[in-house]
Image (spheres, helix red, strand yellow):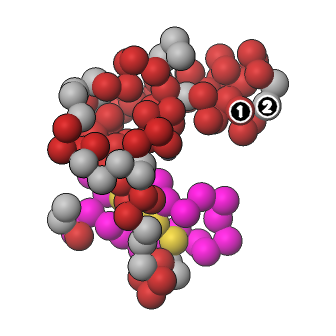
Amino acid sequence: MGSWRILFLLSNNWNYDAISLWPFILVKKNFRHKGIAPSLLRHEMIHWRQQLELLVLPFYLLYFFEWLLKLLFYRSWHKAYRSISFEREAYLFEHTSTYLKDRSPFAFVKFIFK
Ligand SMILES: [Zn+2]
């Protein structure tokens, strides 16, 4: 993938190591020296694809809406986050090196009712 997408802008104290803000992937500043784990990069690239498929803005709206619904259901910030369909897909396949090559478009839909 093109390294132009990766911006080392996030504070090292932040809760998350990286975030995909299409067309960029923002990562913690200290990753410039530490390097980025392939699984982390793949996780963010899965979100990058999801965002592209949903034409970016609807991704964030759906992401937030799904998180809110699941927060009401689970009453747990972390459980709600981990059960968002976009996150389920990303966490399930972040260690599968061929996933982005083989992934079918809109693959996250399968995870909405899981
Ligand atoms: Zn994620």
* SS label for mark 1: helix
Q: Which residue is located at x 53 percent, y 16 percent?
A: 114
Q: Position of residue 25 (x, y in %)?
A: 36, 58
Residue identifier under label 1: 79
Residue 5 falls within the magenta-colored stretch: yes
| Kind of residue at disc 1 | Lys
Disc 1 C-beta below 8 A from ligand 1 = no
Q: Are marks 1 and 2 in contact (CB under 8 Å)?
A: yes
- Residue 103's quadrant in the figure? top left
Circle 2: residue type: Ser
**Left or right of 99 in this view: 89:** right
Residue 16 visible from this viewpoint: yes
Q: Read off the magenta span.
A: 4-24
Residue 50 x %, y %? 32, 34
Closest to the observer, 85 or 19: 85
How dense is the environment of label 1, judged by Cα within 10 Å: few (below 14), some, or many (20 and up)?
some
Q: Which mark is residue 47?
A: none
Give the number of callouts: 2
Q: CA distance from mark 1 to mark 2?
A: 5 Å
| Image spot of residue 67 (x, y percent) | 61, 27
Please indicate, yes or no, whether residue 60 appears anywhere in the rendered image: no
> Above or below — where is 3 with respect to 91?
below
Identify the residue at image location x=56%, y=21%: 66
